Amino acid sequence: MKIAIAGAGAMGSRFGKMLQDSGQTVTLIDNWAAHVSQIQKHGLLVHTDGQEQIVKFEAFQPSELNFQQFDLIILFTKAMQMEGMLQDIQKAIGHNTKILVLANGIGNIETIEHFIPRKQIIAGVTVWSSELDGPGEITLTGTGSVTLQAVQPDDNNALFLQQLVTLMNNAKLNVTVSNSVIEAIWKKAAFNCVLNTYTSLISCNVGEFGAFSNRDFLIDNVLNEITSVAKAMKVPFNKQETLDLILSQFKPGQNGSHYASMYQDLSQNRLTEIDYLNGYIAKKGAEFHIPTPVNSLLTALIHCREELNQMQK
Amino acid sequence: MKIAIAGAGAMGSRFGKMLQDSGQTVTLIDNWAAHVSQIQKHGLLVHTDGQEQIVKFEAFQPSELNFQQFDLIILFTKAMQMEGMLQDIQKAIGHNTKILVLANGIGNIETIEHFIPRKQIIAGVTVWSSELDGPGEITLTGTGSVTLQAVQPDDNNALFLQQLVTLMNNAKLNVTVSNSVIEAIWKKAAFNCVLNTYTSLISCNVGEFGAFSNRDFLIDNVLNEITSVAKAMKVPFNKQETLDLILSQFKPGQNGSHYASMYQDLSQNRLTEIDYLNGYIAKKGAEFHIPTPVNSLLTALIHCREELNQMQK
């Protein structure tokens, strides 16, 4: 299968590496010129448990893409860059191309529908993690899993979905199919609303956050507001399962030393996905007249951090 | 007048320097051994507008104090260390000693009353600022003022208050007497609930905070809760005046490059006064059944930062 990873940052590169290791042909597409150029010239430098490995990839900026089309495009583009990325790679999307969206945040499927019919979209969530150390360099942390669902199931994409699960499990990505991917997307988003946002604001890793005495108070404040907003929007959201998932990250042997992607975004002076996480909850809360003081405050504070990065540039 | 500064950190040292420059005899008392030892051996290094100056002081740790008593003890001790400091220097408090409390935070007078009659206590607030660069070293930033009031006015302390105002104004401390010192203490505390807490959390200076697009939203969130709690407690609190004071800090020519004391506390791995600022609002809010989600969250986040410092020590 001809696979492209659109948005080949920490997570995209990790998936690219694992898929290529399993024998697939993978093309990395990213807008970060220095990152793409480094991979083109020297390959991707991958750190795993203190070991280093160079992985060769076909890598392009969207503007460098030839008229090749892909069987599968895995979208790891950040939520706020998704529309732009899809516009830039439109010529690489054929009539039979499937798009698997694994990017964080709520509301991505609505964006993708502008570019491809619903039945060609696979929605997914993942709790794999990874860190982008610099151009062409990532560190793999911990283990994870992936949950997939066709956005509009039919016989054709049911078959494709089966192939995709097999292909991704050959790459040891721990993939299962679920009938509740929207719920899973909300669960993942809520997970990130808690761990991404708090650890970025406090400047700590996941393990350190798990050791704070106010941890449960902080988690509960965010999840309670999400629960109320989800209820008003009639979206299935299971607070307890989300809480369990969050708490599981603090167990010994989990990737406690992992710094969340938002922390990495801020460290690298990039914009964060806050508007598609806590900011989305705050926005929908306002729409549905649900008070969201905590998510609103956290959103504003992260935006301050983004602006501070710009000021200090 | 025989003056002691108890709690001779950034602000205490600044006041000590300005008072001594005006001809007073000032003793610095502090619990930080390295700071006291540096001042004893080499004097206090004071940076002002790029200039350096060494200022000699009599300096002691509380345990080193002889049986000398002071006419005036100016308390700049942090709120959470006030009780301990007063216990340690009890022998230096005579029948005629007056205590001027200029420390930040709400609830200090109640602590001091355990050690000295109310009529010997002068309460004050100040918006002077200063930075502690290290043991025996401070940087003076911007200008400020002081507002004073006898906690229990009588003829005796009215006379003393007049002397004190003259003495402090000779030291160019811009002192005025007010009949609304509790209101002023709340105003100062609210000022710190906003600027200290947010700038510490965002890791920015006051000028940078003033330039954030979400600045007014963030300020309003904190002040609205304080207004509700003050109303429930029947404490006079003027939101608009507090807001004006905060906004005045962002004007060009103000000390925009100033890092708040809480930021300095966290940088130096010290505990903050958060429980006597936003934490006090949250605690009183809970007592009076006033929702304070914003001040509660900010308190918890600052405590996380304190704990993180301990973890990374």
Image: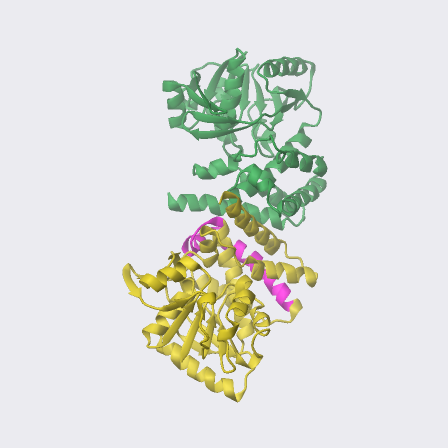
Chain colours: A green, B yellow
| Residue at the image point whose x is 49% and y is 85% from the top | B158
Nearest the viewer among B93 and B154 is: B93
Q: Where is residue B24 in the image (x, y as percent from the top left)?
A: 36, 77
Q: Where is residue A18 in the image (x, y as percent from the top left)?
A: 53, 18
Q: Is residue A310 found left or right of A262 in the rendered image?
A: left
* Numbered range of the magenta stretch: B202-231
Q: Is residue B242 found left or right of A38 in the rendered image?
A: right
Q: Position of residue A172 (x, y in %)?
A: 59, 17
Q: Quadrant of residue B52?
A: bottom left
**Residue B212 seen by the camera:** no
Nearest the viewer among A23 and B108 is: B108
Q: Hey, which residue is sitting farthest bottom in the picture?
A: B155
**Residue A261 seen by the camera:** yes
Taking A216 as reference, is A236 above or below it? above
Q: Is residue B135 found left or right of A217 in the rendered image?
A: left
| Residue at the image point whose x is 67% and y is 27% from the top | A181
Nearest the viewer among B93 and A168 is: B93
**Residue A240 colored in magenta in the image:** no
Q: Quadrant of residue B232?
A: bottom right
Taking B223 as reference, is A230 above or below it? above
Q: Is the magenta stretch mostly helix, strand or loop?
A: helix
Q: Position of residue A133 (x, y in %)?
A: 44, 30
- Quadrant containing the N terminus of chain A is top right
| Residue at the image point whose x is 67% and y is 48% from the top | A290
**Residue B211 colored in magenta in the image:** yes
Taking A35 as reference, is A196 above or below it? below
- Quadrant containing the C terminus of chain A is top left
Count up the numbered dots.
0
